[in-house]
Image (cartoon, rainbow, N blue to C red):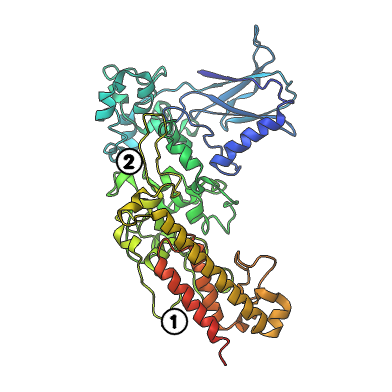
């Protein structure tokens, strides 16, 4: 049995501070939800002993949370650490790893007792999970104890290294040495799922069943440190953010396909959607397959480049639309079925792959577009070439750049083709941005001077907009579905091209010539509406 302690002293005086700290933790892993996920990174991956993670004032008292292996827990409280008397709170059968404490004073101390961590090694998992174990055995994780850099740097006898290259190092039944516990070398099932010997001995007991934890905090236990801050970079990215509730029945299968890590993983694996547990962002396992060696680098689920057109809609069977051979980023960064004939709302802000290939938007010829930009054809790894540039840590202590903010933070890779890449990008983006504003002005001009009077009287300059206007026209709704029929096809095509280029977000960097083609075509259509 293991014990962990927390001191909520001066809880009343620090109430706002505690709420702020916990809010940051929740924001990092997703919005509050019914399922408790690992809240903090723990060296080695999944914690093998109880870890108290917070104490938050509530209307009913104090909410105390903890984490650790699957099993029963008991919370205790004492009002002093001098000859403490630990009083049990609730029953010794807590499985949810949280408790509401009522009537606690502001100088209380808490401890939690949890199940002993019995490690077995992946061999114990073979009987029921042979396919998964045999696949994982060929990954870099499985051979982490034998890698040349790890051995050369004395890792096998360094306590700070073995915690991430073995199973349960430092715990009573965990790794001791390669000679004494060879079955626990490398990164194995229990590194990510927690100690599993109790489960192997009692596979039908749900109380000791190891957790399938998708939160990136599990990976962060090893894939993050001040020199190589991979997790910290991801945490600062948009991939880590959850901007709304995706548990709603109307969103979990539609928006959740690309905005919810748990929902997407369920759809990929053909398992039931995670009802009540969709509010976690795009996590490590969304892009990297944790068990399989794939044909792609770093166990990525999809390749880094492709040149065939692709999109996946927000309705219909997911697996019937999914194409595993399409660019990893394009799996979500596609137009999702946008069409100029849809008048409900502007295209979603995700058509980057289609803009890269020049396969979204309307041309005057009416032909199906396909005008790939040079970045689509000349960059071997397409998106990640620019958005995931890396640099090693410097001898002066500057951390490595791990490429997981997914932002263009340097222009070194561009120098191969462009002598002044940042200046060129600034110029291109400025030119396209100006053309976007000019086109918006022309559409407003059409609304003011050429739109049907009934539309202008009701919507003013928004008369050309979608029923739910895009970001260029704030201030109210646009014409209804019935009123959209009063807007000429040329204007509807022009607004579609405008928002496609705007939604791409690169302002021409992804495919500059094609972006200009779409905007120029839109200009021509607007002019046609003024011709006598």
Q: Which residue is mark 1?
A: 364
Badge 2: few (under 14), some or many (20 or more) residues near its Cα, within 10 Å?
some
Reply above or below: 110 against 99: above
Q: Does the rendering let one see residue 323?
A: yes
Residue 177 versus residue 407 in the image, above or below: above
Query: Mark 2 or 1, which is nearer the eye?
Result: 1
Front position in the image: 93 or 259: 259
The vertical placement of 316 against 485, above or below, is above
Residue 216 visible, this angle: no
Q: Which residue matches tag 2?
A: 132
Q: Earlier in the sequence, mark 2 or mark 1?
A: 2
Would residue 173 be found to the left or right of residue 185 on screen?
right
Q: Position of residue 182 (x, y in %)?
A: 28, 22
Query: Which residue occupies the foreground of this view, 400 or 31?
Result: 400
Residue at point 29% right, 41% down? 135
Q: Residue at x 51, y 53 (%)?
A: 259
Give the side of residue 355 with respect to residue 238, left or right. Answer: left
Q: Residue at x 66, y 85 (%)?
A: 452
**SS class, disc 1:** loop
Task: Choose between 434 and 354: the one closer to the eye.
Answer: 434
Answer with left or right where residue 361 lies relative to residue 187. right
| Residues at circles 2 and 1 in contact by the CB criterion of under 8 Å | no
66 horizontally vs 403: left or right: right
Quadrant where the C terminus sits is: bottom right
User: Which element carries disc 2, helix, strand or loop?
Assistant: helix
Q: Position of residue 421 (x, y in %)?
A: 39, 55
Q: How many marks?
A: 2
- Distance, label 2 to label 1, CA atoms, is 52 Å
Q: Position of residue 251 (x, y in %)?
A: 56, 57
* Residue at point 70%, 84% (across, down): 453
* Residue 142: numbered disc: none
Q: Residue 473 versus residue 211: which sits nearer the camera? A: 473
């Amino acid at each position: 049995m293991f014990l962990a302690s927390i001191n909520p002293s001066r809880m009343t005086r620090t109430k706002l501070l505690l709420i702020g700290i916990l809010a940051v933790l929740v924001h990092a892993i997703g919005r509050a939800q019914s399922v408790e996920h690992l809240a903090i990174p723990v060296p080695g991956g999944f914690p093998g002993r109880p870890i108290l993670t917070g104490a938050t004032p509530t209307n009913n008292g104090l909410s105390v949370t903890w984490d650790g292996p699957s099993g029963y827990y008991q919370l205790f409280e004492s009002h002093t650490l001098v000859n403490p008397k630990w009083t049990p709170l609730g029953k010794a059968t807590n499985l949810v790893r949280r408790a509401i404490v009522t009537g606690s004073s502001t100088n209380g101390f808490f401890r939690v007792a949890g199940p002993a961590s019995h490690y077995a090694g992946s061999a114990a998992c073979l009987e029921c999970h042979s396919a998964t174990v045999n696949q994982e055995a060929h990954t870099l994780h499985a051979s982490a104890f034998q890698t040349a850099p790890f051995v050369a740097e004395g890792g096998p006898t360094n306590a700070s290294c073995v915690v991430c290259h073995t199973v349960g190092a430092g715990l009573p039944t965990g790794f001791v040495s390669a000679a004494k516990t060879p079955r626990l070398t490398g990164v194995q099932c229990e590194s990510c799922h927690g100690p599993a010997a109790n489960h192997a001995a009692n596979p039908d007991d749900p109380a000791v069943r190891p957790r399938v934890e998708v939160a990136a905090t599990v990976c962060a236990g090893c894939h993050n440190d001040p020199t190589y801050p991979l997790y910290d970079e991801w945490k600062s990215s948009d991939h880590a953010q959850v901007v709304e509730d995706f548990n709603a029945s109307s969103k979990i299968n539609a928006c959740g396909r690309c905005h919810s890590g748990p929902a997407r993983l369920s759809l990929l694996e053909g398992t039931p959607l995670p009802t009540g547990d969709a509010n976690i962002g795009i996590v490590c396992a969304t892009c990297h397959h944790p068990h399989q060696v794939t044909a792609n680098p770093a166990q990525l689920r999809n390749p880094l480049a492709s040149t065939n057109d692709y999109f996946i809609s927000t309705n219909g069977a997911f697996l019937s639309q999914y194409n595993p051979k399409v660019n990893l980023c394009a799996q979500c960064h596609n137009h999702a079925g946008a069409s100029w004939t849809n008048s409900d709302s502007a295209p979603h802000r995700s058509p980057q792959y289609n803009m890269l290939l020049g396969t979204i938007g309307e041309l005057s010829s009416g032909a199906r577009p396909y005008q790939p930009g040079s970045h689509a054809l000349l960059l071997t790894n397409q998106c990640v070439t620019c958005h995931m540039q890396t640099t090693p840590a410097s001898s002066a202590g500057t951390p490595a750049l791990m490429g997981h903010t997914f932002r263009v933070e340097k222009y070194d890779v561009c120098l191969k083709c462009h002598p002044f890449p940042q200046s060129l990008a600034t110029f291109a983006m400025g030119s396209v941005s100006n053309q976007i504003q000019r086109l918006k002005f022309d559409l407003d001009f059409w609304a003011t001077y050429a739109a049907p009077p009934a539309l202008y009287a009701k919507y003013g300059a928004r008369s050309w907009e979608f029923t739910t206007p895009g970001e260029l026209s704030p201030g109210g709704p646009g014409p209804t579905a019935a009123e959209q029929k009063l807007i000429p096809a040329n204007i509807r095509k022009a607004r579609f091209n405008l928002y496609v280029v705007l939604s791409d977000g690169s302002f021409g960097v992804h495919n500059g010539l094609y972006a200009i083609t779409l905007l120029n075509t839109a200009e021509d259509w607007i002019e046609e509406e003024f011709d006598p």
